[in-house]
Image (cartoon, rainbow, N blue to C red):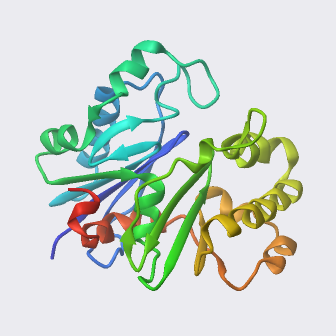
C-alpha cells in the first residue's frame, strides 16, 4: 500500500497530511502559516519540516498557486511578494521563482518521487468522476481553476488573472480580501454571478466549488445554484494528493 504525502500550499497557509491510495488520511493533518518572504528554497524546507512530523510516505504531491508546467514554475502569484497576497512584488523573488524546477527540487530534498501541480488541479483530482467536462473552482485567497475532460486534466488556465472590467480580475472580485470587506452575504452573490459568467465559457457537465471559502457561501445562495453545481469540502485538496498519481502520465510527466 503506497502512502502519499499531500501538500496544499496556499497564500495564507500550508497544509499537509499523509494519505492512503483512496485519499483517506493516515494521520492528523498539519497546517502552518505561509512564511514571507518565500523564495523556493524556503518553501521546500517548510515542506520537509512538515514531512518530518508526519508518518513516512513513499511519494509526495505538492499543489501550489500559479502556472505550473511539467513540474516547473512558470509563474506563481503570492510567493513573489514581500509579505503575501496584495503586497509589493520583489524582483529577486520573481526571478528566483520563474522557471524553477519545483518537482525536481522537492523530489531531491525528500528523497521520494514527486508530482507538483497547480493547487486547484490537485484539488480536482480528488473530486472528479471522470465523466464529461468537469470544472473545479477553488475559492480562497483568490480564485483557482482546473478542468478535466473525461478524467484527463486539460492544460491549465490562469483564469484568476482574467479581467472582468478595467483592472478588476476574478482574483480581486472573489478573493478573501473582498469576502472580508463585503461580508458573506454580498460576497456569496458575487460567487453566483461568477458562475453565470463562466457557464457560457466552459459549458461544463459539472462544476465543483471548493477551497476554504466555499464553506462561507450562504444557504440562500446555495439554494439558488443550478443542479450541475456541487459545493465540496476543502479536504479534497489532500485526498487529491493520492489520486493525482492516477492521472495520465503526460499531465505531469
Relative to 15, 178 lies left or right: right
For the residue pair 123 and 20, the one nearer the viewer reads as 123
Q: Quadrant of the N terminus?
A: bottom left
In the rendering, at what x and y percent does residue 236 appear?
47, 68
In the rendering, at what x and y percent does residue 21 appear?
26, 75
- Relative to 18, say whether 76 is above or below: above
Q: Quadrant of the C terminus?
A: bottom left
Relative to 224, 210 lies left or right: left
Tell me, yes or no, if residue 176 can be seen here: yes
For the residue pair 103 and 168, the one nearer the viewer reads as 168
| Image mark count | 0
In the rendering, at what x and y percent does residue 98 appear?
36, 28
Relative to 112, 71 lies left or right: right
Taking the spot 41% from the left edge, 82% from the top edge, the residue there is: 130
Tell me, yes or no, if residue 141 can be seen here: no
Q: Quadrant of residue 108?
A: top left
In the rendering, at what x and y percent does residue 11 appear?
53, 39
Taking the spot 37% from the left edge, 36% from the top edge, the residue there is: 74
For the residue pair 229 and 181, the one nearer the viewer reads as 229
Q: Quadrant of residue 75?
A: top left
Relative to 95, 78 lies left or right: right
- Relative to 151, say whether 61 is above or below: above
Taking the spot 83% from the left edge, 71% from the top edge, the residue there is: 221
Amino acid at each position: 500500500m503506497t502512502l502519499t504525502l499531500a501538500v496544499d500550499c496556499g497564500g495564507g497557509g500550508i497544509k499537509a497530511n499523509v494519505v492512503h491510495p483512496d485519499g483517506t488520511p493516515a494521520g492528523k493533518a498539519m497546517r502552518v502559516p505561509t512564511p514571507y518572504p518565500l523564495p523556493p528554497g524556503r518553501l521546500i524546507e517548510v515542506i520537509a519540516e512538515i514531512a518530518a512530523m508526519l508518518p513516512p510516505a513513499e511519494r509526495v504531491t505538492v499543489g501550489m498557486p500559479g502556472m505550473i508546467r511539467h513540474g516547473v514554475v512558470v509563474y506563481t502569484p503570492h510567493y513573489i511578494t514581500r509579505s503575501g497576497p496584495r503586497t509589493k512584488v520583489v524582483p529577486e523573488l520573481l526571478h528566483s521563482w520563474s522557471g524553477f524546477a519545483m518537482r525536481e527540487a522537492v523530489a531531491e530534498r525528500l528523497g521520494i518521487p514527486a508530482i507538483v501541480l497547480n493547487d486547484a488541479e490537485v484539488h480536482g483530482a480528488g473530486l472528479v468522476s471522470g465523466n464529461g467536462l468537469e470544472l473545479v473552482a477553488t475559492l480562497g485567497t483568490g480564485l483557482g481553476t482546473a478542468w478535466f475532460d473525461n478524467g484527463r486534466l486539460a492544460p491549465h488556465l490562469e483564469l484568476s488573472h482574467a479581467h472582468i472590467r478595467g483592472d478588476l480580475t476574478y482574483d480581486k472580485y472573489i478573493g478573501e480580501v473582498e469576502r472580508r470587506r463585503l461580508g458573506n452575504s454580498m460576497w456569496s452573490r458575487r460567487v453566483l454571478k461568477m458562475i453565470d459568467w463562466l457557464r457560457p465559457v466552459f459549458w461544463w457537465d459539472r462544476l465543483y466549488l471548493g477551497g476554504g471559502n466555499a464553506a462561507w457561501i450562504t444557504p440562500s445562495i446555495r439554494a439558488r445554484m443550478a443542479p450541475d453545481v456541487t459545493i465540496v469540502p476543502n479536504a479534497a485538496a489532500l485526498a487529491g494528493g493520492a489520486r493525482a498519481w492516477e492521472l495520465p502520465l503526460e499531465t505531469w510527466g
